[in-house]
Image: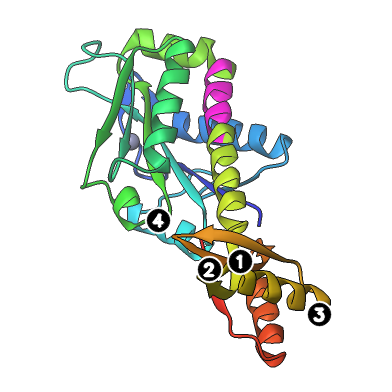
Amino acid sequence: METNIYLDAGHGGYDNGATYNGRKEKDDNLKLTQAVGKALRDKGIMANFTRVNDVYQSPGEKAQIANEDMADLFVSFHRSSSPVPNTYNGVEAYVYETGGDNEKLAKEITNNLEEAGFKNLGVHVNKNLTVLKKTKMPAILLDVGFVNTDSDNKIFDENFDKIVNAIVNAIIASLGRREQQVAEEGADYTIQVGLFRNPENADNLVASLQADGYDAMIEPMGGYSAVLVGRFSNQEEAEKTEEKLQNAGYETFLIER
Ligand SMILES: [Zn+2]
Protein backbone atom coordinates (compact mmCIF):
# COMPACT_ATOMS: atom_id res chain seq x y z
CA MET A 1 0.00 0.00 0.00
CA GLU A 2 1.37 3.36 -0.99
CA THR A 3 2.20 5.75 1.81
CA ASN A 4 0.15 8.93 1.78
CA ILE A 5 2.12 11.88 3.12
CA TYR A 6 0.24 15.02 4.05
CA LEU A 7 2.07 18.32 3.94
CA ASP A 8 0.45 21.23 5.69
CA ALA A 9 1.41 24.83 5.01
CA GLY A 10 0.67 26.52 8.33
CA HIS A 11 -1.84 29.40 8.48
CA GLY A 12 -3.28 30.96 5.28
CA GLY A 13 -5.85 33.52 4.17
CA TYR A 14 -6.47 36.22 6.78
CA ASP A 15 -4.27 34.27 9.18
CA ASN A 16 -0.78 35.44 8.19
CA GLY A 17 0.99 33.63 11.01
CA ALA A 18 3.95 35.67 12.22
CA THR A 19 4.97 38.73 10.20
CA TYR A 20 8.12 40.80 9.96
CA ASN A 21 8.96 43.71 7.66
CA GLY A 22 6.25 42.72 5.20
CA ARG A 23 7.26 39.08 5.26
CA LYS A 24 4.40 36.74 6.13
CA GLU A 25 4.92 33.33 7.68
CA LYS A 26 2.00 31.84 5.71
CA ASP A 27 3.80 32.58 2.40
CA ASP A 28 7.10 30.99 3.49
CA ASN A 29 5.18 27.96 4.78
CA LEU A 30 3.36 27.53 1.46
CA LYS A 31 6.48 28.00 -0.64
CA LEU A 32 8.42 25.39 1.36
CA THR A 33 5.51 22.94 1.51
CA GLN A 34 5.01 23.12 -2.26
CA ALA A 35 8.72 22.60 -2.95
CA VAL A 36 8.94 19.62 -0.57
CA GLY A 37 5.79 18.13 -2.11
CA LYS A 38 7.10 18.54 -5.64
CA ALA A 39 10.44 16.94 -4.72
CA LEU A 40 8.65 13.97 -3.09
CA ARG A 41 6.35 13.54 -6.10
CA ASP A 42 9.36 13.70 -8.45
CA LYS A 43 10.68 10.68 -6.54
CA GLY A 44 7.39 8.85 -7.03
CA ILE A 45 6.14 9.38 -3.47
CA MET A 46 2.51 10.28 -2.84
CA ALA A 47 2.43 13.77 -1.32
CA ASN A 48 -0.77 15.66 -0.67
CA PHE A 49 -1.45 19.14 0.66
CA THR A 50 -3.93 20.64 3.08
CA ARG A 51 -3.78 23.86 1.03
CA VAL A 52 -2.13 24.79 -2.26
CA ASN A 53 -3.03 28.48 -2.21
CA ASP A 54 -3.65 31.34 0.16
CA VAL A 55 -6.83 30.18 1.90
CA TYR A 56 -7.72 30.15 5.57
CA GLN A 57 -8.11 26.81 7.37
CA SER A 58 -8.42 26.36 11.09
CA PRO A 59 -5.89 23.91 12.57
CA GLY A 60 -8.83 21.58 13.25
CA GLU A 61 -9.78 21.63 9.56
CA LYS A 62 -6.21 20.88 8.56
CA ALA A 63 -6.16 17.80 10.79
CA GLN A 64 -9.59 16.72 9.53
CA ILE A 65 -8.49 16.90 5.87
CA ALA A 66 -5.58 14.54 6.59
CA ASN A 67 -7.76 12.22 8.71
CA GLU A 68 -10.45 11.96 6.02
CA ASP A 69 -7.84 11.17 3.36
CA MET A 70 -6.35 8.43 5.59
CA ALA A 71 -2.91 10.06 5.63
CA ASP A 72 -0.01 7.94 6.93
CA LEU A 73 2.18 10.85 7.93
CA PHE A 74 1.48 14.53 8.59
CA VAL A 75 4.08 17.29 8.46
CA SER A 76 3.02 20.83 9.30
CA PHE A 77 5.33 23.63 8.15
CA HIS A 78 5.71 26.81 10.17
CA ARG A 79 8.26 29.41 11.10
CA SER A 80 8.92 30.65 14.62
CA SER A 81 8.67 34.19 15.90
CA SER A 82 9.79 35.99 19.02
CA PRO A 83 8.43 39.14 20.74
CA VAL A 84 11.59 41.09 19.92
CA PRO A 85 13.04 40.66 16.39
CA ASN A 86 16.53 39.16 15.97
CA THR A 87 16.56 37.64 19.46
CA TYR A 88 16.55 33.94 18.63
CA ASN A 89 17.52 31.74 15.71
CA GLY A 90 17.23 28.10 14.73
CA VAL A 91 14.90 25.28 13.75
CA GLU A 92 12.80 23.17 16.07
CA ALA A 93 10.15 20.50 15.78
CA TYR A 94 7.15 19.53 17.88
CA VAL A 95 5.54 16.15 18.51
CA TYR A 96 2.54 15.18 20.64
CA GLU A 97 4.44 12.32 22.25
CA THR A 98 7.92 10.84 22.08
CA GLY A 99 9.04 7.30 21.29
CA GLY A 100 7.41 6.86 17.87
CA ASP A 101 8.10 7.29 14.16
CA ASN A 102 7.16 10.94 14.45
CA GLU A 103 9.91 11.68 16.97
CA LYS A 104 12.48 9.87 14.81
CA LEU A 105 11.43 11.85 11.77
CA ALA A 106 11.44 15.13 13.71
CA LYS A 107 14.97 14.48 14.97
CA GLU A 108 16.19 13.53 11.53
CA ILE A 109 14.71 16.66 9.96
CA THR A 110 16.15 19.01 12.57
CA ASN A 111 19.56 17.29 12.28
CA ASN A 112 19.46 17.59 8.49
CA LEU A 113 18.39 21.23 8.72
CA GLU A 114 21.37 21.91 10.94
CA GLU A 115 23.54 20.72 8.06
CA ALA A 116 21.59 23.07 5.78
CA GLY A 117 22.78 26.00 7.94
CA PHE A 118 20.32 26.45 10.79
CA LYS A 119 20.98 26.19 14.51
CA ASN A 120 19.30 23.02 15.83
CA LEU A 121 16.96 23.84 18.71
CA GLY A 122 15.76 20.23 18.94
CA VAL A 123 12.48 18.34 19.22
CA HIS A 124 9.92 19.20 21.89
CA VAL A 125 6.69 17.69 23.16
CA ASN A 126 3.67 19.96 22.86
CA LYS A 127 0.20 18.76 23.87
CA ASN A 128 -1.56 21.96 22.82
CA LEU A 129 -1.00 22.04 19.07
CA THR A 130 -4.29 21.10 17.40
CA VAL A 131 -2.72 19.63 14.25
CA LEU A 132 -0.71 17.23 16.43
CA LYS A 133 -3.55 16.50 18.83
CA LYS A 134 -6.33 15.92 16.28
CA THR A 135 -4.43 14.01 13.58
CA LYS A 136 -4.81 10.24 13.76
CA MET A 137 -1.47 9.44 12.08
CA PRO A 138 2.15 10.18 13.15
CA ALA A 139 2.47 13.95 12.94
CA ILE A 140 5.12 16.60 13.43
CA LEU A 141 5.16 20.37 13.31
CA LEU A 142 8.28 22.11 12.05
CA ASP A 143 9.41 25.64 12.79
CA VAL A 144 11.90 26.37 10.04
CA GLY A 145 13.82 29.27 11.55
CA PHE A 146 12.53 32.55 13.00
CA VAL A 147 10.63 34.72 10.56
CA ASN A 148 11.65 37.84 12.51
CA THR A 149 15.35 37.01 12.61
CA ASP A 150 17.32 38.31 9.63
CA SER A 151 20.01 35.63 9.76
CA ASP A 152 17.40 32.84 9.66
CA ASN A 153 15.61 34.49 6.73
CA LYS A 154 18.94 34.70 4.91
CA ILE A 155 19.43 30.93 5.38
CA PHE A 156 15.82 30.26 4.39
CA ASP A 157 16.17 32.22 1.15
CA GLU A 158 19.74 31.41 0.16
CA ASN A 159 19.79 27.72 1.15
CA PHE A 160 16.22 27.01 0.09
CA ASP A 161 17.05 23.99 -2.10
CA LYS A 162 19.28 22.51 0.63
CA ILE A 163 16.45 22.94 3.13
CA VAL A 164 14.02 21.18 0.80
CA ASN A 165 16.47 18.29 0.32
CA ALA A 166 17.12 18.09 4.07
CA ILE A 167 13.41 17.60 4.74
CA VAL A 168 12.79 15.30 1.75
CA ASN A 169 15.72 13.02 2.67
CA ALA A 170 14.47 12.67 6.24
CA ILE A 171 10.95 11.84 5.04
CA ILE A 172 12.30 9.22 2.62
CA ALA A 173 14.38 7.64 5.41
CA SER A 174 11.25 7.53 7.56
CA LEU A 175 9.30 5.82 4.75
CA GLY A 176 12.11 3.26 4.41
CA ARG A 177 11.84 2.41 8.11
CA ARG A 178 8.08 2.16 7.81
CA GLU A 179 8.18 -0.14 4.78
CA GLN A 180 10.74 -2.38 6.45
CA GLN A 181 8.52 -2.60 9.51
CA VAL A 182 5.47 -3.49 7.41
CA ALA A 183 7.50 -6.15 5.54
CA GLU A 184 8.77 -7.66 8.78
CA GLU A 185 5.36 -7.64 10.41
CA GLY A 186 3.81 -9.11 7.27
CA ALA A 187 6.05 -12.21 7.16
CA ASP A 188 4.96 -13.25 10.58
CA TYR A 189 2.19 -15.85 10.36
CA THR A 190 2.46 -19.60 10.46
CA ILE A 191 0.00 -22.39 11.29
CA GLN A 192 0.68 -24.81 14.09
CA VAL A 193 -0.86 -28.20 13.31
CA GLY A 194 0.54 -30.17 16.19
CA LEU A 195 2.66 -29.98 19.33
CA PHE A 196 4.34 -33.20 20.48
CA ARG A 197 6.53 -34.32 23.35
CA ASN A 198 7.61 -37.29 21.23
CA PRO A 199 9.47 -36.12 18.10
CA GLU A 200 8.47 -39.28 16.27
CA ASN A 201 4.82 -38.19 16.35
CA ALA A 202 5.86 -34.86 14.91
CA ASP A 203 7.75 -36.63 12.11
CA ASN A 204 4.69 -38.71 11.31
CA LEU A 205 2.44 -35.65 11.12
CA VAL A 206 4.92 -33.81 8.87
CA ALA A 207 5.00 -36.84 6.55
CA SER A 208 1.21 -36.90 6.44
CA LEU A 209 1.00 -33.13 5.75
CA GLN A 210 3.65 -33.36 3.05
CA ALA A 211 1.77 -36.22 1.45
CA ASP A 212 -1.25 -33.90 1.35
CA GLY A 213 0.88 -31.28 -0.40
CA TYR A 214 1.56 -28.90 2.50
CA ASP A 215 4.82 -27.15 3.22
CA ALA A 216 5.34 -28.58 6.73
CA MET A 217 8.29 -28.35 9.09
CA ILE A 218 9.24 -29.05 12.70
CA GLU A 219 10.34 -26.37 15.10
CA PRO A 220 11.44 -26.95 18.70
CA MET A 221 9.18 -25.06 21.07
CA GLY A 222 9.82 -25.15 24.82
CA GLY A 223 10.73 -28.85 25.04
CA TYR A 224 8.10 -29.84 22.47
CA SER A 225 8.23 -30.35 18.72
CA ALA A 226 5.84 -28.02 16.96
CA VAL A 227 4.62 -28.95 13.49
CA LEU A 228 4.19 -25.79 11.45
CA VAL A 229 2.71 -25.21 8.03
CA GLY A 230 3.78 -22.33 5.82
CA ARG A 231 4.98 -18.81 6.27
CA PHE A 232 2.48 -16.13 5.39
CA SER A 233 2.93 -12.45 4.78
CA ASN A 234 -0.62 -11.64 5.82
CA GLN A 235 -3.24 -13.05 8.11
CA GLU A 236 -5.86 -13.58 5.39
CA GLU A 237 -3.60 -15.93 3.41
CA ALA A 238 -2.80 -17.86 6.57
CA GLU A 239 -6.46 -18.19 7.49
CA LYS A 240 -7.31 -19.54 4.03
CA THR A 241 -4.76 -22.32 4.40
CA GLU A 242 -5.91 -22.91 7.97
CA GLU A 243 -9.45 -23.50 6.73
CA LYS A 244 -8.23 -26.04 4.14
CA LEU A 245 -6.28 -27.87 6.83
CA GLN A 246 -9.31 -27.95 9.12
CA ASN A 247 -11.47 -29.30 6.30
CA ALA A 248 -8.88 -32.04 5.81
CA GLY A 249 -9.26 -32.99 9.48
CA TYR A 250 -6.22 -31.25 10.99
CA GLU A 251 -6.41 -29.28 14.20
CA THR A 252 -4.86 -25.85 13.64
CA PHE A 253 -3.69 -22.90 15.62
CA LEU A 254 -2.65 -19.64 13.96
CA ILE A 255 0.65 -18.26 15.24
CA GLU A 256 1.57 -14.62 14.87
CA ARG A 257 5.14 -13.68 15.77
ZN1 LIG B 1 2.97 29.26 12.47
> Three-letter amino acid code at disc 1?
Thr
What percent of the width, then of the height, locates residue 196? 53, 72
Query: For residue 190, which numbered disc appears in the image?
Result: 1
Q: Distance between the residues labelled 2 and 1?
A: 5 Å
Above or below, 77 relative to 220: above
Query: For residue 126, which numbered disc appears in the image?
Result: none
Q: Do the residues labelled 2 and 1 touch (CB within 8 Å)?
A: yes
Q: How crowded is mark 2: few (under 14 residues within 10 Å), some or many (20 or more)?
A: some
Q: Distance between the residues labelled 2 and 4?
A: 37 Å
Task: For marks 2 and 4, give the one nearer the viewer.
Answer: 2
Q: Residue drawn at (42%, 49%), measured in percent from left and top? A: 138
Q: Do the residues labelled 2 and 4 touch (CB within 8 Å)?
A: no
Instruction: Residue under label 3, please give it.
Output: 212
Instruction: Residue under label 2, please give it.
Output: 255
Task: For marks 3 and 1, give the one nearer the viewer.
Answer: 3
Q: What span is in magenta?
A: 162-171
What percent of the width, then of the height, locates residue 221? 49, 60
